[in-house]
Image: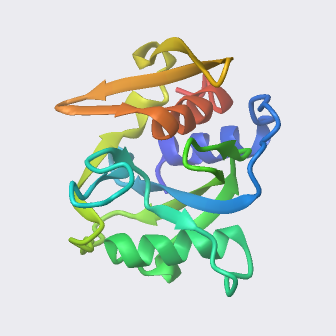
Amino acid sequence: MNDVINRFVQRFQMQLPPLASATQHQRQAAVLIPVICGNEPSLLLTRRSSQLRKHPGQVAFPGGAADETDSSLNITALREAYEEVGLNPDRVDIIGQLPPLDSISGFQVTPIVGLLPDGLQFKQNKNEVETLFEVPLGYVLNKDNYHSIEIIRRNKPLRIYFIYYADNFIWGLTASILQRLATQVHGFL
């Protein structure tokens, strides 16, 4: 591993996660935050198929609902990453997780952070994933790249984060997860 990845892992594992509000949803889901350990470390993200019924065309992490047969949320994230982008679970080194967040679709989503070796080939499931792209790790960990707005949803204030990278508009739960990751490892660069 290079120095940037070593510092990222140390900072991520040694810092307390950001305070999270209590989750309300009972249905469990998990996403994988895939950190690619190249010369310039990056995160792998997907753009969901525009044919999907829920969240079409949105930027997301590989992930989804927990199955009854999943023995843990780590297994859920790895299974979903395999199904969506062809990621072999044996190539992922899980280093931890962030606190769960509630999604607007009724799930309690747990982000699982995993390291991937550089040079892996991915094969997206065209029924679920329109395209794959990478964002430099340093870019998503820079808190200055985030913006937010506050809206009222069901008579409660809700902060929505968003971040732009190249031609990609990342918002909602995905941006909230990235912003939490940036908050947890703040100052590592």
Residue found 82% across the figure and 37% down from its top = 22
Residue 30, image x and y in percent? Answer: 60, 60
The color scheme shown is: rainbow
Residue found 60% across the figure and 73% down from its top = 76
Apparent side of residue 54 relative to residue 52 in the rendered image (left or right) = right
Residue 161, image x and y in percent? Answer: 49, 23
Residue found 21% across the figure and 71% down from its top = 126
Residue 86, image x and y in percent? Answer: 34, 77
Residue 62 vs residue 49, the one in the foreground: 49
Question: Which residue occupies the extreme front position in the image?
Answer: 154
Residue 72 vs residue 156, the one in the foreground: 156
Q: Which of the 4 image quadrants contains residue 137?
A: top left
Q: Which of the 4 image quadrants contains residue 14?
A: top right
Question: Which residue occupies the extreme left position in the image?
Answer: 167
Q: Is residue 19 visible?
A: yes
Residue found 30% across the figure and 60% down from its top = 52
Label count reads: 0
Apparent side of residue 83 relative to residue 181 in the rendered image (left or right) = left
Residue 136 vs residue 128, the one in the foreground: 128
Question: Which residue occupies the extreme bottom position in the image?
Answer: 69
Vertical order, 75 against 37 (above or below): below
Residue 130, image x and y in percent? Answer: 20, 59
Q: Is residue 43 visible?
A: no
Vertical order, 113 against 59 (above or below): below
Apparent side of residue 121 relative to residue 55 in the rendered image (left or right) = left
Residue 141 vs residue 41, the one in the foreground: 141
